[in-house]
Amino acid sequence: MTFSFFGSGSRDLAIDLGTANTIVYAPGQGIILDEPSIVAVETFDGEQRVIAVGTDAQAMEGKTASSIQTYRPLTGGVINELVVAEEMMKHFIYKATSARDGSFHPGEIVVVVPSKATSVERRAIQAAGINAGARRIRLVEEPMAAAIGAGLPVTEPIGSMVVDIGGGTTEVGIVSLRALIYGTSERVAGETMDDAIASYVRREHNLVIGNRAAERVKKEIGSAEANAEGRHIVGSVSGSDLATGRPREISLNQAEVAEALKEPVYRIVEVVLSALENVEPEIASDVIERGIMMTGGGSLLRNIDQVLADETGLPVQVAEEPLRCVALGAGRTLEDSEFRRALCEA
């Protein structure tokens, strides 16, 4: 099999089909695509057509005429708009496998799914991939992919715990000997944090801001823990005044943002504590010794690792490439026979 863009053979891919971003991995090359999971659809004379996907569609978000709508076809890591998701997957698969003659040759595709995805949700992902042109769809559960991508010893008889905070879900998993011993999903993650910031600004400052503005605040000055110093770390955000409807800009400090994020951070801590309560004694000793590995974009929130360490009493570390761990792990299942047994059928 060839992995060349311009070869005549089919090409295998691993796809982290995320609520916020879709990342595509090609064996032998690594990450070849990382774009927002957004599709722009235009309605004309009662007919709809996709006009942009990914980065191009994101540029249109909130700035289009009424005839153009932008969609995020995944919620909580699972498909909620099947037709739109198919178009998005087809676009990304074509982009990753297209040849100079305009043909494209997708082979076997591994897709990441939440550990608690239902059989219906799994079949929807399989259908979207097959309709997008894949020869075969196989699935890998997100905590397992995250653990592999973070370099945890998943093929050994050692219990390892991973907490992956993505865009739509927080996945907590305990893995050992290529198996997910325990896995759970909670629909509280990066987008929940953005919503919490937007709600706080509306409630406390009478200002309506968009999710992209809230996300920017989270990245620039967000923190999982409030402290006195946070009042001196200040950022700004613009939106529409609730009373007048006019544009207005305000200043926010880090302590305020930490207050806004208190509820979603607490929910994430609760999910982790619940997982620890379900650990078998033999695995528990490994987890106590090795601690918790954090992955996903949410793990980059300032001090969230410290909050988790304080609440669990365990050592916590953030993976080297937290945003890409899941895609890297899924990709390794295609490259290394040691990890292929971690795959499950749709």
Image (tube, helix red, strand yellow):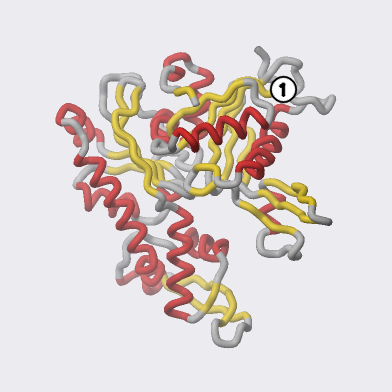
Quadrant position of residue 84: top right
What's the amino acid at mark 1?
A: His
Quick check: 249 above or below 12? below
Residue lying farthest bottom? 244
Is 149 above or below relative to 230?
Answer: above
Q: Is residue 5 left or right of residue 188?
A: right
Q: Is residue 139 left or right of residue 279?
A: right
Give me the residue at 63% from left, 33% from top. Answer: 32
Q: Please state if 229 lies on the left or on the right of 241 as rendered.
A: left
Q: Residue furthest front?
A: 46
- Location of residue 96 in the rendering, given as x and y in whole percent from the top left corner: 69, 31
Instruction: Please name the residue shown 71% across and 52% down the image.
Output: 40
Residue furthest top in the image? 1
Q: Is residue 266 above or below residue 26?
A: below
Residue at (49% x, 71% y) in the render: 235
Give the residue pinned by disc 1: 105
Categorize mark 1 by other alpha carbons within 10 Å: few (<14), some (14-19), many (20+). many
